[in-house]
Image: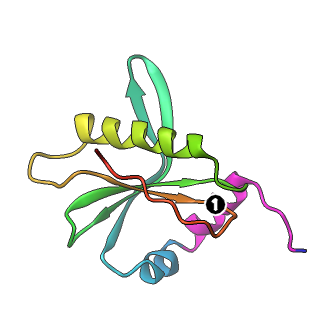
Amino acid sequence: MGIEHSEAELEAGIINNIRSFLSKMGGDFSFIGNQYHLDIADDDYYIDLLLFHRRLRCLIAIVIMIGEFKPEYAGKMQFYLTALDETIKLLEENSSIGIIICKSKNRTRVERS
């Protein structure tokens, strides 16, 4: 059984190795920030990692969860994507995309409806 890490430790590991992480993600990503702050209706929210994809011309929100995937993670991601599109995205950019990183290998996509 492997060593368990907290979400903060996993995020710190990615940040410490951001160049390698982005290269493994395909090379067209630019790092915008970690714990990216969103102020929505006077409430504070934080996206674990925020990237920009040059070819897709869109923001990429990454949420890191150390446990198994739960359906409510998709709802949280949808909230983040809507907030990014309404407050951060530029007019010429495409809609934001979300990636949820979980312990399990079950793959779930969050798509805008």
Q: How many marks?
A: 1
Residue drawn at point x = 49 percent, y = 39 percent:
75
Q: Amino acid at mark 1?
A: Cys
Residue 28 in percent (x, y) is at 30, 76
Residue 20 in percent (x, y) is at 51, 81
Residue drawn at point x = 57 percent, y = 74 percent:
17
Residue 106 in percent (x, y) is at 61, 66
Q: Element type at marker 1?
A: loop
Residue 89 vertical position relative to residue 93 in the rendered view, above or below? above
Residue 23 in percent (x, y) is at 43, 82
**Residue 109 covered by magenta stretch:** no
Which quadrant: the N terminus?
A: bottom right
Query: Residue tagged by mark 1?
Result: 102
Question: Bounds of the magenta span?
Answer: 2-17
Which quadrant: the C terminus?
A: top left
Residue drawn at point x = 24 percent, y = 58 percent:
58
